[in-house]
Amino acid sequence: MGSILFTEDVRLMTKAYDYADFASPAPHPGEYLREDYLPGYKLTAGGLARAMGLRDRARIERLVREKQAITADTALRLARVFKTTPEFWINLQVAHDLSKAAIAARDELAAIKPLAAA
C-alpha cells in the first residue's frame, strides 16, 4: 500500500459527510433511545438501567433528555442489551457532536483552504 492510495482512501472517507452543510445537528443518541428503543422494548429509564447493570437510572435519564453524551462504557452496555455494536452507539454520538460543531463553526471552516499534497 502506497501513501497515495492511503491518502485517497482518507480523502474519500472524509468527504462522506460535510457536516457544515447540515441545517440542524444530527439527532442525539438519547433521541433514538427515547423514541425508538425504550418504547420498542417497553422499557422505562429505570428498566433499561437495570438491564444494563447500572445502580441507578440517572445516566439513562440524562441520555434521553439529551443532557449526557454516550460514553464508551454506555456504548458497550447498550450494545449488549440491544444486540447492536458499541460502534453503533459511539457513531451516533460522533455524528451528533461533529454536526453540532460544524454548524457552529460553519464560516470559520469555510475559510480554511485544504492543503495540496506535494
Image (cartoon, grey):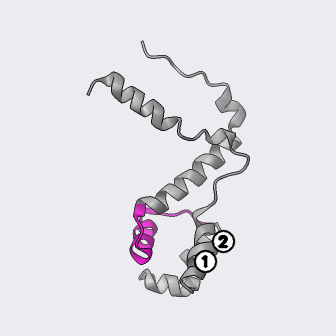
As for residue 82 lying within the magenta part, the answer is yes
> Residue at the location (67% across, 28% down)?
110
Quadrant (top left/top right/bottom left/bottom right) for the N terminus: top left
Q: Position of residue 33 (x, y in %)?
A: 58, 72
Quadrant (top left/top right/bottom left/bottom right) for the C terminus: top left
Q: Amino acid at mark 2?
A: Arg
Main SS category, magenta section: helix
Q: On the picture, is 51 further left or further right than 32?
A: left
Q: How many marks can you see?
A: 2
Q: Which residue is mark 2?
A: 65
As for residue 45 lying within the magenta part, the answer is no
Compared with 63, 111 (above or below) is above
Compared with 84, 104 (above or below) is above
Q: Give the Cα distance between marks 1 and 2.
A: 6 Å
Q: On the picture, is 50 further left or further right than 98?
A: left
Name the disc covering residue 82, or none. none
Q: Position of residue 116 (x, y in %)?
A: 49, 16
Name the disc covering residue 61, or none. 1
Q: On the picture, is 9 further left or further right than 21?
A: left
> Residue at the location (68% across, 39% down)?
21
Q: Amino acid at mark 1?
A: Glu
**Contact? badges 1 and 2 (CB < 8 Å):** yes
> What span is colored magenta in the figure?
68-86
Q: Position of residue 39 (x, y in %)?
A: 60, 81
Q: Quadrant of residue 28?
A: bottom right
Callout 2 crowding tier (Cα within 10 Å): few <14, some 14–19, many ≥20? some
Q: On the picture, is 67 further left or further right than 51?
A: right
Q: Determine the secondary structure under disc 2.
A: loop
Q: Quadrant of residue 43?
A: bottom right
Q: Position of residue 41 (x, y in %)?
A: 53, 83
Compared with 117, 98 (above or below) is below
Q: Determine the secondary structure under disc 1.
A: helix
